[in-house]
Image: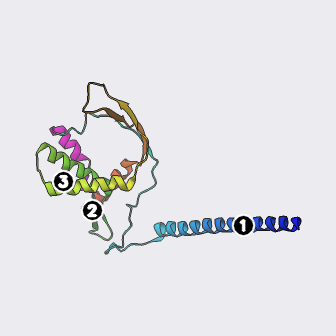
Amino acid sequence: MDSDATTHTSNNSRTRLWIVALCIFMKISMILFFCSIQVGEKTNKVYSFAGDDFPRLLPLAQADPVLMAFEDSVHYQINTEDGRAEWASLTPGNGLVYLGEQPGRPFSISMFHQLRCLDIIREDIVGADSNAALSRHCLNYLRQMIMCRSDAQLENILLASKEDSLQPFFVRPGTYVCNNWNSVLEEVKRNQAGAER
């Protein structure tokens, strides 16, 4: 009887193992199938740019990531003319692109929307062109984008001096691997030049 119980247990274990393996295989197959559909949509889909029929990302050639060392900068000051010009230069043509049949439908790119919002808040801080409703929109938009992207990279905490009770520590972020913002900037400039013709 013990040998029958052992055989029965062994068969149950093998059956469970095969069921688990089959489930894993089916799950992987489904993932690959849905990924292939999404890839096919990206490369083969033709958009009308009417209503909600447009791509969710700006069509860009694949660019290698870049390293960015985060540091305090002498550029992008809050209340200088040079700083104002540097902030304005971050969003050429208000960061708009025109897609679809000429004259093209205007779209904003998230990166440029975020940079414009930072500049709007900067203007509000220095008291130039203050617009509380627009600043409120920008603060909420930036908060939502930060939460949406949920960057989980660890940042080094350094303790400040004991005399500085207002800021007990500060963060030194270090180096990040980033998307290549220059490829986005170049594509936007190319798009805007084509739209002007």
Q: Secondary structure at mark 3?
A: helix
Q: Residue at x 54, y 69 (%)?
A: 34
Residue 48 visible somewhere in the drawing: yes
Q: Secondary structure at mark 1?
A: helix
Residue 6 screen position, x and y as percent: 84, 64
Location of residue 94 (image quadrant): bottom left
Residue wearing tag 1: 16
Q: Residue at x 41, y 38 (%)?
A: 155
Q: Amino acid at mark 2?
A: Ala
* Crowd rating for badge 3 (residues with CA inside 10 Å; few <14, some 14–19, many 20+): many
Please tell me which residue lies in front, 11 or 172. 11
Location of residue 189 (image quadrant): bottom left
Residue 93 visible somewhere in the drawing: no
Badge 2 or badge 3: first in the primary sequence:
3
Q: Main secondary structure of the magenta part?
A: helix
Residue wearing tag 3: 135
* Crowd rating for badge 1 (residues with CA inside 10 Å; few <14, some 14–19, many 20+): few
Residue 196 screen position, x and y as percent: 24, 61
C-alpha distance separating marks 2 and 3: 30 Å
Location of residue 153 (image quadrant): top left
Q: Residue at x 51, y 66 (%)?
A: 39
Residue 96 in the image: above or below residue 152 = below
Residue 57 screen position, x and y as percent: 39, 61
- The magenta stretch is 79-94
Residue 164 in the image: above or below residue 91 = above
Q: Nearer the viewer, mark 1 or mark 2?
A: 1
Residue 154 screen position, x and y as percent: 43, 41
* Crowd rating for badge 2 (residues with CA inside 10 Å; few <14, some 14–19, many 20+): some
Disc marking residue 3: none
Magenta residue check for 85: yes
Residue wearing tag 2: 195
